[in-house]
Amino acid sequence: MEQQSQTKSDLGILRAALESGTMQQVERMVSVLHPAEVALLLESLPPPERNIVWGVVNPEDEGEVLVELNDEVRTRLIEGMPLDELVIATEGMELDDLADLIADLPEAITQRIIRSLNQQDQERLRDVLAYPEDSAGGLMNPNMVSVRPDVTLEVVLRYLRRLGEMPDNTDALFVVGRQGRYLGVLLISRLVTQNPQKTVAEVMDDSVESIHVGTPAGEVAKEFQNRDLIAAAVVDENGRLLGQIMVDDVVDVIQEQADHDILSMAGLDEEDDMFAPVVTSAQRRAVWLGVNLATAFVAAAVVGLFKPTLDKVVVLAVLMPVVASMGGIAGNQTLTLMIRGMALGRVESSNARWLFAKELAVGLLNGLAWAAVVMVVTRLFFSTWTVGMIIAAALAINLLVAAFAGFTIPLLLRKAKIDPALAGGVVLTTVTDVVGFVAFLGLGTIYLT
């Protein structure tokens, strides 16, 4: 909360300085901010002001700022940068950050940046680029420190002093055997506190498991969370050490997943620029508006089947939204619970049946309870127990179906390789609307006409 307030304060001061034309204040302010803070400010500015602020960013910091930006904002800024400036901006960047930056660039620019590196870094960067961006291989940094198990701690300390520096957040060295096979870790705390004459094998921890290079980024994040990791070794199918993943990279993955889950439910992309041109934003949103319109027409067609009943009993038309709305809310509760549980790996075949029974029981209990409330309210407002009982029965049916749909829809979408967060809400709304209208109007047709 404090960081968000500080960001709001920075944004207000920056915009005031831009409006007053005091560019020296803008430059001083930007120069003292962390690259991630500069990126957040850039994402929070309309394009004209964004370009002005980008122009005062220190060229040495441009690469670090670009890495922190979302894809669309970064692409727009890169399009306006001369190639030589872009190459300079990438100098000295960590290879995993550099891989993230150039993954979506045109091939000619990518090759130019790669050629600016030394031979060893070129090979390491190509290794990272060979893996999907959302995998352990795409997240890893090939720069790491490894030692052999048969050397003494004194030799390791001399080696580190000669090396001069280590990757940020390093809390352990990786121990490798013949052909670079990962064996375990040597904690820095043990390195500096144990007898220097001991060998690495005597003090290393061989219980720290590695992560396979093909592991999805979401699974990597779970491993870091469950095992409280700061860094983890990345290995190939033969157990050979390829690189390491640091906790700061995993935090980025968690943030991206959270943004994706929230925005996908509205049919939006977490990488979209919120200050994109009006036409561009309208085109993106039009897709899911069109899908929603199609599902609305489906519900309308169902209602149209009961037009004779509605003509005779107008009160049914007044009460229809109650059944559909309650079903939609109840279904979304279960849907959200399922999507989150699936994302965190908490929903598996071993516990799915128990959870399914529980959600049906919750739906039935809520259905009966609120059906009684709605029946009484309907009797008070419309002076008819018959309509009250009909809407009560329809509501109970719809809440039970909503629980069923909220549970099964994410599972079916995942099997179909469709993102449940993106399509689940639309499908669920259609189901609860159609079932609610059919139950309510169908019962009304049977008992009132």
Image (cartoon, grey):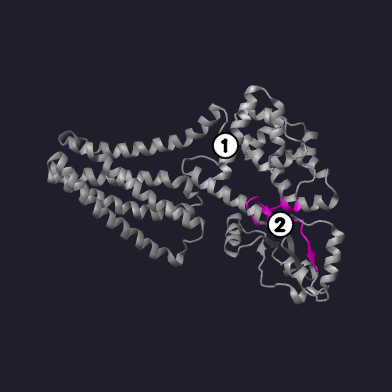
Indicate which disc, 2 or 1, sits on the residue closer to the N terminus: 1
Q: Position of residue 77 (x, y in %)?
A: 68, 33
Q: Which residue is mark 2?
A: 169
Is residue 176 rendered magenta in the image? no
Give the amino acid type for the residue marked by disc 2 in the picture: Asn
Label 1 amino acid?
Lys
The span from disc 2 to disc 1 (Cα, nearest Å) is: 29 Å
* Count of all numbered marks drawn on residues in the image: 2
Question: Dot 1 corresponds to which residue?
Answer: 8
Report x, y in % for residue 311. Answer: 18, 33
Say whether residue 306 is visible. Answer: no
Quadrant of residue 63 within the rendered picture:
top right
Towards the viewer: 363 or 249 = 249
Residue at 66% in and 72% down? 207
For the point 78% across and 66% down, the residue is 180
Q: In the figure, is residue 212 to the left or right of 447?
A: right
Asked whether the viewer can see residue 113, the reply is yes
Residue 389 is left or right of residue 355, and the answer is left
* Residue closer to the observer: 216 or 74: 74
Most foreground residue, 4 or 242:
4
Say which element carries label 2. loop
The stretch in magenta equals 126-147
